[in-house]
Image: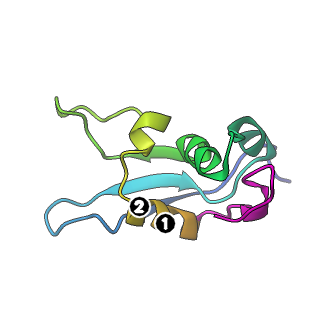
Amino acid sequence: MGVLGQVETKRVKLPSSKENDEHWVVVSVSITAGDLYSSKGDNNIQTTFNLLSKIIKEWNFTDETGKIAPITIENVQKLEMRDVLSIQEVVKVPQDELSSDKKKI
């Protein structure tokens, strides 16, 4: 019997990693209806970043003081695009639902 709302997570090494500086995130590999519903933005790009800020559960990015940076929309927007695309490959993102006009990213 499954636990309602419980989703599998996966640690993803990001392409922006360097030899002695690994970048990673822990993400939900599937998206709940609630996460999708509460992430709707004015366009599919805004929706994508809203959604990423919800499904990224942990990361090792730090702020300028060396503390782990909070996972916010603003901080998610600072990720390199190759990292965003890498995360999207792992997560089962319902592309046709990301925008109200049903356009794919």
> What residue would you read off at disc 1?
85
Local crowd at mark 2 within 10 Å, few (<14), some, or many (≥20)? Answer: few
What's the distance in space between the residues labelled 2 and 1, CA to CA?
6 Å
Q: What coloring was used for the rendering?
A: rainbow
Can residue 71 be seen in this snapshot?
A: no
Image-quadrant location for residue 51: top right
Label 1 near label 2: C-beta < 8 Å? yes
Can residue 9 be seen in this snapshot?
A: yes
Q: Position of residue 55 (x, y in %)?
A: 58, 47
- The residue shown at (42%, 53%) is 25
User: Which type of secondary structure does the marked residue at label 2 adopt?
Assistant: helix
Image-quadrant location for residue 89: bottom right
> What residue would you read off at disc 2?
81
Nearer-the-camera pick, 97 or 6: 97
Q: Position of residue 19 (x, y in %)?
A: 16, 69
Q: What residue span does the magenta drawing correspond to?
A: 91-105
